[in-house]
Amino acid sequence: MARTVALITPTNSHEGINLLTQLLGSTDIAQEVAGCGLTVPPSDAVGLASAIERLVDDRALRAAMGVRARERAEERWSRTRILGRFERQLCELAA
């Protein structure tokens, strides 16, 4: 199992969130973060500090990733989407 540490920082109501994760290996979370946040390997303090500085220093990057994160969350993780997927899976199992 991959070890994951996530730092999630809210932006504002018009954007999503900025997500910074420390990941070990390839994980589903890494795929979710792609384009919406930054990843660094676990125990890489220098890389983590660099990624945080990048988010702090680059307002346009933060805003763009925040918008993409919000879009992705609404597309994949809204209550309606989750329940719809769950219902389809139950119907497939029952068939």
Image (cartoon, rainbow, N blue to C red):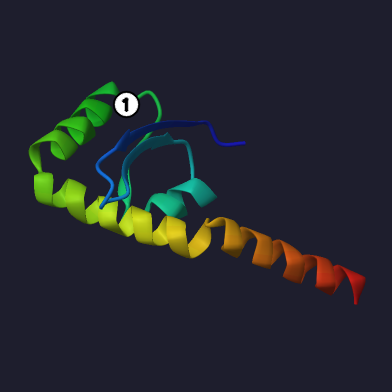
Q: Considering depth in this image, is 65 or 39 the residue closer to the camera?
A: 65
Q: Residue at x 32, y 26 (%)?
A: 44
Residue at the extreme bottom: 95
Tell me residue 67's x, y (percent). 27, 56
Q: What amino acid does circle 1 point to?
A: Asp
Q: Considering depth in this image, is 55 or 45 the residue closer to the camera?
A: 55
Tell me residue 5's x, y (percent). 44, 29
**How many circles with numbers are drawn on the protein?**
1
Crowdedness near tag 1: few (<14), some (14–19) or many (≥20) residues, C-alpha within 10 Å = few
Q: Locate residue 49: give its quadrant.
A: top left
Q: Quadrant of the N terminus?
A: top right
Q: Locate residue 48: give its quadrant.
A: top left
Q: Locate residue 72: give its quadrant.
A: bottom left
Q: Is residue 13 left or right of residue 95?
A: left
Tell me residue 30's x, y (percent). 44, 48
Residue 63 seen from this side: yes
Residue at the extreme front: 13
Q: Is residue 71 left or right of residue 29?
A: left
Q: Residue at x 18, y 38 (%)?
A: 55
Q: Which residue is mark 1?
A: 44
Residue 39 seen from this side: no
Q: Secondary structure at mark 1?
A: loop
Answer above or below: position of 95 versus 60. below
Q: Residue at x 53, y 31 (%)?
A: 3
Q: Residue at x 32, y 49 (%)?
A: 16
Tell me residue 35's x, y (percent). 31, 57
Q: Quadrant of the C terminus?
A: bottom right
Answer above or below: position of 38 versus 4. below
